[in-house]
Amino acid sequence: MASVNERLTEFSLEAHDLYLNQSVPYLEEPPDPLQFYRDWIGPNKPCIIRNAFSHWPALSRWTPEYLREKVGSKVISVAVTPNGYADAVNGDRFVMPEERQMSFSAVLDIIQGKVQQRGVFYVQKQCSNLLEELPELTDDVEPHVPWMSTALGKLPDAVNFWLGEANAVTSMHKDHYENLYCVISGEKHFILLPPTDRPFIPYGVYQPAVYRQQDDGEFEVVDQSDSEKVPWIPLDPLDPDLERYPQYRRAQPIHCSVKAGEMLYLPSLWFHHVQQSHGCIAVNFWYDMEYDIKYNYFQLLETLCEVTGST
């Protein structure tokens, strides 16, 4: 096993030396589908694309006033946590947010400081929440990204809407989707690590639980005892505990900020941690590529790391 661990480490370091960038490159215009597949999707490398959705009405329309008028009365799903960390390890638990049903205007009241509430609020429900909960806004964006759909030969599996406070943080994780993340207003701050850095990224298995706000405003953690344990990353890349997770010293995280009008291509299986400016609005497109050949390739790497206990 020691020799396998050593080779996994060499593989990761070679990937950085041979083809991975030390920063996220920029493209100044929407790419040709075939060229994008060859240069970015196939090699599994992220990039930021400018002027890719400058024609969307959302860029100029989605002010708080417009959103109140258009969807203010709509009841949507909102994640509420005491500290902004939803779907994250807290002690020996994997804790999910309290999911609360609120009107869109009520969320805007909190974000704009018109109403004071204990907790951190984040519109982050996936499963195509833009289409399912806010269809009134779909005319302001495209239903898919044409050049990406052409490159992959399919339409997106989900189109998601994001709106939240500055304290709302997405903990380090990975997805099996090809992800196009479009910032409409504000900016998002990403910490990215490639799948080949998996040997340096710790995982644990945790009892799932949810936050629940009590009548006095305090939050309690309630176990979901009938649910299976969840594998998750306990490390916080903003303040990594290198004594506990010394292998993370060898990881090579990439930091990038995606501003309003910019689109991040986040390849499948890249680890990512996300922060945002206050009131940031974004839309993302998920293309499910779970059975793509590169997915199977990186799943093999994942299995080797699990078997050898490399973290």
Image (cartoon, grey):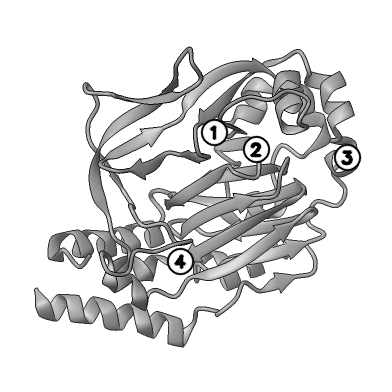
Choose between 157 and 171: the one closer to the eye. 171
Callout 4 secondary element = strand
Callout 3 secondary element = loop
CA distance separating discs 2 and 1: 9 Å
Whichever of labels 2 and 1 marks the residue nearer the N terminus, that label is 1
Q: Which residue is mark 2?
A: 162
Callout 2 secondary element = strand
Counting the numbered discs, the total is 4
Q: Looking at the rendering, which quadrant does residue 156 occupy?
A: top right
- Left or right: where 208 falls relative to 293: left
**Comparing labels 4 and 3, the label whose residue is closer to the camera:** 4
Does the residue at mark 2 contact the one at mark 1 (Cβ under 8 Å)?
no
Q: Looking at the rendering, which quadrant does residue 198 occupy?
A: bottom left
CA distance separating discs 3 and 2: 17 Å
CA distance separating discs 4 and 3: 33 Å
Q: Which residue is mark 1?
A: 126
Callout 1 secondary element = loop
**Comparing labels 3 and 2, the label whose residue is closer to the camera:** 2
Which three-letter amino acid code belongs to the residue tagged 4? Leu
Q: Position of residue 110 (x, y in %)?
A: 71, 27
Whichever of labels 2 and 4 marks the residue nearer the N terminus, that label is 2
- Quadrant of image for the N terminus: bottom left
Which three-letter amino acid code belongs to the residue tagged 2? Trp
CA distance separating discs 4 and 1: 22 Å
Q: Position of residue 237 (x, y in %)?
A: 44, 61
Q: Which residue is mark 4?
A: 193
How would you rate the neighbour count of disc 3 (Cα within 10 Å): few for under 14, some for 14-19, many for 20 or more?
Answer: some
Q: In the rendering, which numbered label is found on residue 57?
A: 3
Which three-letter amino acid code belongs to the residue tagged 3? Pro
Rendered residue at 62%/22% (across/down): 132
